[in-house]
Image (cartoon, rainbow, N blue to C red):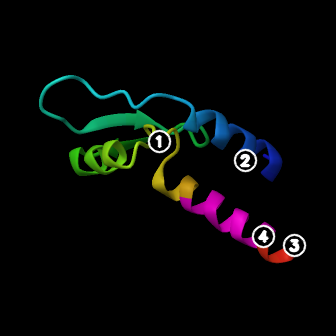
Amino acid sequence: MPINEVLTEEVASQQQTLAVAEGPLQDITVTCKQREGTFVFTKGEQRFFQRNKMTQPARCPECRKWIHEKRAETASKN
């Protein structure tokens, strides 16, 4: 997938609202939209995301790391 497409999808995924049930938080199994594998979005991560007004991640930690690294590479070239 070209980096421009990945970055465009990343922006779109940030527009999702954080889907957290009312009441006590529970670990959630989420499907990565890039690799289509699953990962656990833990209670602690959910609290962090809520406090920082971030949306629920659409990609697994490995894919998010890869995107972050690609952005850093692109920024260093400019």
Magenta highlight on residue 11: no
* Residue on which the image places disc 2: 7
Please report the residue visible at 65 percent of the width from the left and 68 percent of the height from the top. 69
Q: Dot 1: what SS?
A: loop
* Residue on which the image places disc 4: 75
Q: In this view, does 6 lie to the left or right of 48?
A: right
Q: Nearer the viewer, mark 1 or mark 4?
A: 4
Query: What mark, if any, has residue 78 been given in the picture?
Result: 3
Displayed quadrant of residue 54: top left
Q: Nearer the viewer, mark 1 or mark 3?
A: 3
Comes first in the chain, label 1 or label 3: 1
Q: Do the residues labelled 4 and 3 touch (CB within 8 Å)?
A: yes
Identify the residue at the far top of this view: 22
Comes first in the chain, label 1 or label 2: 2
Residue 38 in the image, given as x and y percentages of width and height = 42, 40
Q: Is residue 19 left or right of residue 70?
A: left
Distance (Cα) linking label 1 and label 3: 28 Å
Q: Dot 3: what SS?
A: loop
What's the magenta region?
Answer: 65-74
Amino acid under disc 1: Pro
Amino acid under disc 3: Asn
Distance (Cα) linking label 2 and label 3: 16 Å
Please report the residue visible at 31 percent of the width from the left and 51 percent of the height from the top. 48
Distance (Cα) linking label 1 and label 2: 14 Å
Residue 2 visible in rendering: no
